[in-house]
Amino acid sequence: MNVINILDYGADPSGNNDSTNAIQSAFDAAVNGDVKSVYMPKGNYSIYQTLLVEDSINLVGDGKEYSKLIWKETTNTGNEDLIYLSNGSRTDNFTWSDFRVQFAPRDGIHMVDVHQWVLQNIITDTCGRHGFYHENSWKGLFIACMSNQNGENGFHAGTNSQTTNVLNCWALANSNTGIVAARESFVNGCTLETNEYCGVYVGNAGVNLAGNYFEGEGNNSNPSEGHIYHILIENTNGVHIGGQDSLKNIDIGLMIKNSRNVQLSGLTGRQAGGTLGSYGWDKYGNVALWVTEDCEDIVIGAIESVPMVIEDLSKVYFLRDRKPDQDILDGYGFFNEEGSYSGIAENWIPDIDKGVGLAELIVSDTESIGEFVQKITMTSTYQGINNTTTFKANTTYTIGIFVKNEIKVYLQDPDGTRIADQDIYPSPYMRFLAFQFTTGSNPTGPLRIRSREGSGSFYIGGVKVVEGEYDMSTFPMPSEHDLGETAFVLKSPNGSRYRLNVDNAGQLITSPL
């Protein structure tokens, strides 16, 4: 095997002695000689100074759990990388694989001006800053690498890095972000778990995210101290997000800020009603997707019913079941920050018990069906809404509700029993929630929404009860098709609404709504 073995230069695999000079000598021999591959056999190698690689050489170990470079020096300035690769000019066409880097004061592996390279099956962990860092680097691949418990980011694309792809990698429990994506790159098939601030950060153009998995909160995450995201896209353009999967939302699944030409597709519910999130009604009021008003040309297709905030619907295009009037949606739960829902059918407006709560119609900022939401001002802990639907005995129902609440509320079924297992905590935006309940032998009472905190206000965008068990992703959402399978709705310039249809002779029929 035509390689340079670090043991031949005096490296100690037991870890009892300093192997820095021996490994550095092996690297230098590869840089200056004809043999360009360095082999690191199984062992724990103690490192006390930064290892410098100043040209294109290959590094290979016996496996990421077996060949380990472990930083041991305790008198550090905090600026030391364990491996630093740069020769002051372009370094290209090399492969590193099958070893582990631990405890670097700054970066585990720091690369500058590298091109056409592959890092495969490598672990960087417990480093002071980033696990993997690259700047001014092109056409690189991270494959099946892991970066965990680092002081800042797991995989970090620095200045002027592009076409650097992260494939089938794992970023776990990093104190800031799992992956900072490079310009014009792919992040595909990765697992992002318990990263403190963000799973994937996209601040560069031309990024494609697909088939990634997200789970869990950071160890010290607290949404009151700032949002925590699975994916954050900001100040960029030309981004595609498709086929993401998530077990548990942490605060906001996918946030899009000040960006344009972003396309989302293939985001479907998996567990507890969320494409990128959980039920969305816990203490912090989780959101699966949030698009800020400073965005442009956001295209959304094939997303099921999940908690969303759309601050300006005119900036977003919906590809699923689009109507002639683009503001008219097919009932998938899109909201603006003021709490309006853009697709509530008229028959979802609830009955109001005016003897208990004061009902006020609040005009939405959007122009769409169901442009009113109910504001309920509570004067006591009694019910704010009575729904006198006739219920069958001993039957399971699901209640779907759009709610934005300033006070803690709960639901009560016709038998006077609380429906949800816990209170619905206050949220600054409208959410869709779905809950099941089973009636008793004589369900004569109304369905109620009650306050847990006395006086205060909450907003209702609609209430619907259906027989059977549904979660948020399968609940039969309201739709313009409630007006007829072939009906469409258009708005006139003065705001009047008309239903459009055709008769058997193909003649257009219009009727006011």
Image (cartoon, helix red, strand yellow):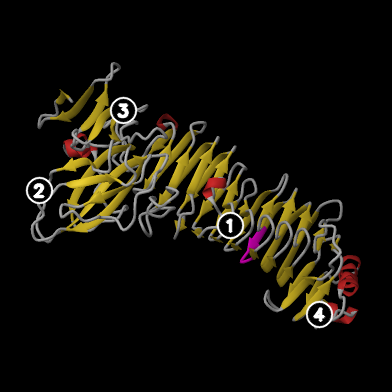
Report which residue position mark 2 lands on: 390
Of the 4 image quadrants, the one containing the N terminus is bottom right
Residue 486 at least partly seen: no
Q: Earlier in the sequence, mark 1 or mark 4?
A: 4
The earlier-in-sequence mark between 1 and 2 is 1
Q: Main secondary structure of the magenta part?
A: strand
| Three-letter code for the amino acid on which mark 4 is drawn | Gly
Residue labelled with disc 3: 362
Instruction: Using residue 49 as the reference point, say whether residue 92 is left or right of it.
Output: left
Secondary structure beneath disc 1?
A: loop
Q: Amino acid at mark 2?
A: Thr
Foreground disc of the pair 1, 4: 1
For image coordinates 18% across by 51% down, the residue present is 466
Residue nearest the viewer, comparing 366 with 429:
429
Whether residue 393 sits left or right of residue 225 in the image: it is left
Kindly identify which residue carries mark 4: 15
Which residue is drawn at the image coordinates 63% and 59% (left, top)? 174
- Neighbours of disc 1 within 10 Å: few (<14), some (14-19), many (20+): few
Q: Earlier in the sequence, mark 4 or mark 3?
A: 4
Tell me the number on the disc at residue 297.
none
Q: Report the magenta residues as a range.
A: 141-145
Q: Residue furthest top?
A: 494
Give the secondary structure at mark 2: loop
